Every structure is written in structure tokens, then in C-alpha cells.
Amino acid sequence: MALISKKKIIYPISSSLRTYLKTYSREAKLPVRYEDLLRYNNAVSLFDHKGDDTLWATVFYPQSDMQHIHHSLKMIYAKLKANGDMSVIEHLFVDRIDLCIYGNTQPFRIRIVNRVNDNFDYFYVKNADASRIYGLELEHLLSPNRISYLVDHKTLIEEHIAGIPGDLFMKHYLRDSNINEIRLAKEFIKFNERCFVRLLGDMHSSNFVIEITPDFEEVHYRVRAIDFDQQSFEGRRSIYLPQYFKQNNPLIELGLRNMTPETVRQYQKEERSLIIRRLIASRYEIKDLLDAMTNDTLSTPENVKQLKTELGNYYKDSGFEKCRNMGEIVKKSLKRAFKHQDKITFNH
């Protein structure tokens, strides 16, 4: 069983990471920043349709600030979704601004609505954390998912990742007689592999969503990470394997029912082959990102020592001992993806 030991440290954006963000158009001048949204003068608890407390609070602003804040948030949405084309905000309005009162970085969630057809979308305004930014960028480059985000000084803007939260999926969907258990198990194996190779931790059921896409004969599933705070921070190897979180046990048990060790290894190799293709396709971005990452501090010396030792023992590769920081460990882990020699068992 995997458990996070301590509250995650928030790391500032280094000059090398800032250079990367500018080079690849991730940095933008924003009309409002995270600290501006803290000027609310009232808040009420937000309840879901069943009347349960969501642990989010809807915040309100003085009239003197509200118009500016709402217009600025629409401008940010245009930058995030339409490369700054302000014509897209003509029929949009800010319906709600929510503050997550329990989150590590206390993010704001913005609900944007189209007044013509009532269609809505969300995006998030957060305190920028270097670990999270590296996690977002690695997800964008090495997974099948594209990620849109922007950074300005200490403010991080993230798009909403749509899908059914993992815990809700396991509670309400796993018993559906129409579910394709083999396809779902396959996707979780591949998700497990991606997290381990790029060292994304803490992927329990509240930190990923499951997309369901109808195919012409069947249904396709995709497991997507939605929380990137634990990118290469913890020292224990098990933290980077979703299979070891007890919250994910229903998916693990589904895999054990439907998969043999041979099919598990096959899907692991398939995913590593796809990661290699993505590495090759994005080799310049990956090189620049890892150059920044290997010159950055993203964890404690104790965690670095523990992780490189555990990975070295697991892979029987003494090369991990030469790694000086988490960036170098991630780089070494990605290099191993080219060897196709690793066997990760799909059980507890």
C-alpha cells in the first residue's frame, strides 16, 4: 500500500524552467493573477446536487473589483483556449468563482458559460509550483494527452481535464453489465506504466479521471492524471505505481480477473514503445525540459537518495546511484524505456 508521508513542498520556478516556459510559449502576460483573486469579501460553501458539501467555497468580490476580475478571467480563457483571440469571449460570462479550501495550493476554479447556448467550461488559477509544471509538461510530451496551461510570475493557469473521477467511476460504473473489463484493465496497466516511467506519484482514485468514448463496435477508455503536484518528489518507488494505492483496488482486482502475466507484459511493452515514439517526436522539447529539470531542486536530499537506491535495486542498475537530483533520476528512468527489459507485475 502506498501512502504520502508529508505535505508536498511547493518549489518556486527556477530561471532555467522560466527560460523553457518562454521558449515554448507557456509564459504569458495575464491581466489578473492568483493573488488578485484573494481579494474576495464573502464566501459560501458549495454543495453538489445531492446536498453534500464539496469542500469548495464560492467567493464574491466587491463591486469595485468584480467587473475587472470577471473581464480579466474571460481574457485569460481566450489565451488558454483560442491563442488570445478575444472574439471568442463575446458571448461568455463568468458564472462562478470557487476556491478549494482543502487543496495543497488552494486553487480557484472558474466556471465560464456561453450565454447563447448555456454551454459551460472550467479552468483553474493556482499558485505556480515547479513540480506541477514539470508534471504538466511531461504529461503533454509523453502521454497521449495534450495539456494547455499558462504561467505568469507565480500564477499558473490550467485547463479543466474532463472525465469521470476515478473514485466515482469505481463506485457507480464498475458494476455496469455493459462495461468492457478487458479494455478498462488494459488502459489502467498502460496508465500505471506511464506514471512509473516518468515518475508521477500519488495517482490514487481522486487524482485521475476516466474518459469513456464510444467506438463503432465497442467503448474505449482512457485513464488521465489530473493532479501533477507529486511529480518526482517522494522517495518510495511504490508511490509512482498506481497499482499500490488501496483506493485503486477495484481496478486492480478487475485486472487480476482479466489479465495474465503475459498480457500484462505485452501492454507494458506497448506503452513503453509509444513513450519512445513520443520521446523521439518531441526530442528537442524533452532535452530542454530535462536540462532545466536536472539543474533544479524538486525534492529533499533524503527522498532523492531513497528513490535512486530503490530504483537501482529494482532495475539492478547501479547507474541510478550516480543521479544527484530528481531531474537526473527522471532522465535515467526515461533512458531505460529504450531497453524494453523491465517487468512490472500487476498485483499487490
Image: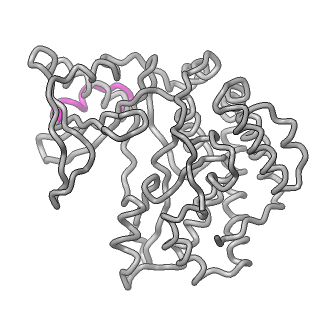
Give the camera-side residue of 87 and 249.
Answer: 249
Q: Quadrant of residue 81?
A: top left
- Residue 96: percent from left, percent from top: 18, 37
Q: Residue at x 64, y 43 (%)?
A: 234
Query: Where residue 239 appears, x then y in whole percent?
Result: 62, 52
Left/right of residue 195 with respect to residue 73 in the rendered view: right
Residue in the picture at 73% in, 37% down:
304
Residue 212: which quarter of the image?
bottom left
Residue 92 visible in the snapshot: no
Q: Is residue 188 magenta?
A: no
Read off the magenta span: 82-94
Residue farthest to the right? Answer: 318
Relative vertical location of residue 5 with respect to residue 148 in this rendering, above or below = below
Horizontal side of 128 relative to 76 (left or right) equals right
Quadrant including the C terminus: bottom right
Residue 97's quadrant in the figure? top left
